[in-house]
Amino acid sequence: MHAPSPPAFPQIWRNPTLKIVVCMKETPSTEVPKSLGADMRLVRNPSDTIINPFDEYTIEEGLRQQEKLGGDVIILTMGPGTTNDPMRRALAMGATSGVLVSDPALAGSDAVATGRVLAAALKKLEADLVLFGQSSADAYGGIVPSITAEFMGMPLLSYATKVEVAGNNVTIEREAEVGYTTATAPLPALVSVAKAINNNPRYPSMKGIMTAKKKPIETWTLADLGLDAAQVGAGAAKERVTGATPVSTQRRREIYNGSAGAAQRIFEFLVENKII
Amino acid sequence: MTNDIWAVADIEGGKLKSISLQLASKAAQLAAALGGQSAAVALGKGAQEAAAALGATGVNAVLVSDDAVYDAYLAQPATDVLAQLIQQRQPKAVLLPATVTGRDVAGRLAARLGLGVEYNVTAADVADGEIAMVVPAFGGQLNVNATFAGDGTRLIVARQNAFAITKTGSGATTETIPAPAAPANGAKVSGPFGTEGATEEGHMTTVNGHPQYVPPPSRSNVEEAAIIVSGGRGVGGPEGFADLDALAKALGGAVGSSRPVTDDEWLPHHHHIGQTGRTVKPELYIACGISGAVQHQAGMQTSKYIIAINKDKDAPIFTFCDLGVVGDLKVVIPELTKLVEDYKASH
Ligand SMILES: Cc1cc2nc3c(=O)[nH]c(=O)nc-3n(C[C@H](O)[C@H](O)[C@H](O)COP(=O)(O)OP(=O)(O)OC[C@H]3O[C@@H](n4cnc5c(N)ncnc54)[C@H](O)[C@@H]3O)c2cc1C
Ligand SMILES: Nc1ncnc2c1ncn2[C@@H]1O[C@H](COP(=O)(O)O)[C@@H](O)[C@H]1O
């Protein structure tokens, strides 16, 4: 039995005014141990801020789409922007320009507030194609893309392992349990890119690093987006953190010697710990 | 707001996923503790058939719709119907699966209705009339305790295997709910494609002139799997992975590997776990013939339980496992597979 072939993509369309916006989060490096402060927020060290590793695939995908379709790649990030290093690195990879949304009132924003702010900025940018990563490496939420899509009243093609723009539509492939499915939506649309796209994010070249220094980065505040401080930040969040405990990496380290009877011991372990 | 708790089922390709039963069981338990009613919501192809299994978890009601619109578009129709039901009936909380679709629906509901949403939840219980949750943070280094403030239905996106399945077998009522119209600018779905070569069993093939063992798709997604049977160079070659795959099948898990295994094409590349491969966090990781190099450890160290089987008593893997067997995997694995199969057949 043969499944039908996927649809063929029509002729590629180049549009010099196409606006591809990549939403990039600045995350703390995963190499450094983390702790919460008395305010129950992550203790941040500005010098260990990196591009959310999942967003590197997204930036790469944005640049590849631009190479095919034309237009600009704009990096949009909401955050403290303490160092701007991640933004400069994204520009050094080849993005056209950056927008940083930063405002003291944004501190403590939850995913809903983040989506609200990104949606307002994306509307202001008049984005045609918006790309997200599959999740942030600090919260593993994977939820900001759908929140943003809802605030924009737009379709979201999530978890893409392939992205194709043709005519006024964007089509993605997504891995299914068996094979893959495709999903198509009219532009403007949002796409979240799965790590499994495996598109080898490029390293900034020496020339890229030099030109990035002169590329424009705009900073927008809540007022620039017409948002009210009461809609964002810690005050608007409906979730509360009440405490935290470090997870012990200590393990039981029970050792069973020899092959004979070992399977029985493992089996008992599975039953004892309710794994089967 | 009522004290009712709902669970949203996850159905893929007409098949009810186990996480649906876990969420329904938890919904029944939380509602009982709060003195409210519980319900499971099943949408799309297979929803009618899923109603009985969902009802057996002890929920009071199952809300179903197998309208084609749910499978024709991503997330939007499910959001439309759930938003309407939540506004009409005001449940205290809705549990959703931490799957791609579950997250997409939860995010849209939170934005549309202005609700709080907690994601990656691994535990949820009632404390002082409120729902208290545990959420792992910072790559599993911390467990954060979280709750909700203010009014409004709480959205709780829970991880696979966070909750146990209960089977009370009580008779739930089934209610058919209406379907929304197709969204005007919806993301329209087609497929599945590429299923031609997909067999339900693993098989040997040749890649770049090397023999390779290909586990079936249902045991290939290490990132989603709750149990991973992982093999290293000690498995001896691609053929050896048939034994590991048989154990993965018996346990309902996936097959993983160390890097040399995929470098040498013994398995396809997406099985590779570690610093340069996939990061996994299953309930159980069984490392077979893996020495436990730091680069491998980086990709699997937050697994809940780690079991190691290795011939060498000095292998580093024994310093970070819960149960270690100093023995021959070629003997232990087939015996273990048999024990698990027999146990599952009688339970
Ligand atoms: C930059 C870099 C990145 C890397 N990234 C990764 C990564 O992402 N993932 C990764 O896995 N590795 C990675 N590596 C490689 C890593 O350093 C190790 O070389 C690799 O993990 C070893 O794989 P192994 O445990 O399968 O093989 P080995 O180290 O050769 O271990 C095989 C083990 O099998 C045991 N054994 C043999 N026969 C049997 C038997 N019959 N029964 C039981 N036990 C048996 C042996 O005692 C031995 O301990 C990376 C290396 C570098 C330098
Ligand atoms: N503060 C932010 N600024 C820009 N993009 C973000 C921000 N937070 C999340 N995103 C985007 O949303 C994706 C998913 O993030 P999350 O939902 O936090 O896991 C990320 O990969 C980014 O593309």
Image: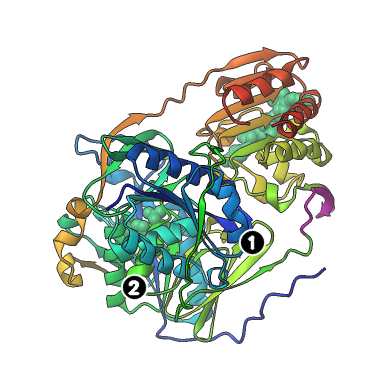
Along the line of sight, which residue is nearer the eye, B65 or A129? Answer: B65
Identify which residue is drawn at 77% across, 17% down: A259
* Chain of the residue under the numbered disc 1 shown in the image: B
Q: CA distance from mark 1 to mark 2?
A: 29 Å
Tell me if A246 is positioned left or right of B340 in this view. Answer: left
Tell me if A26 is positioned left or right of A276 in this view. Answer: left
Q: Secondary structure at mark 1?
A: loop
Which color scheme does this rendered protein use? rainbow
User: Residue B105: horizontal and vertical position, in percent?
Assistant: 43, 61
Along the line of sight, which residue is nearer the eye, A116 or A86? Answer: A116
**Would you name the residue on which mark 1 appears?**
B13
Q: Which quadrant contains ligand 1?
A: top right
> Magenta segment, which residues?
B198-211
Identify which residue is drawn at 55% across, 23% down: B320
**Would you name the residue on which mark 2 appears?**
A152
Per the image, is B199 magenta? yes
Does mark 1's beta carbon lie closer than 8 Å to ligand 2? no
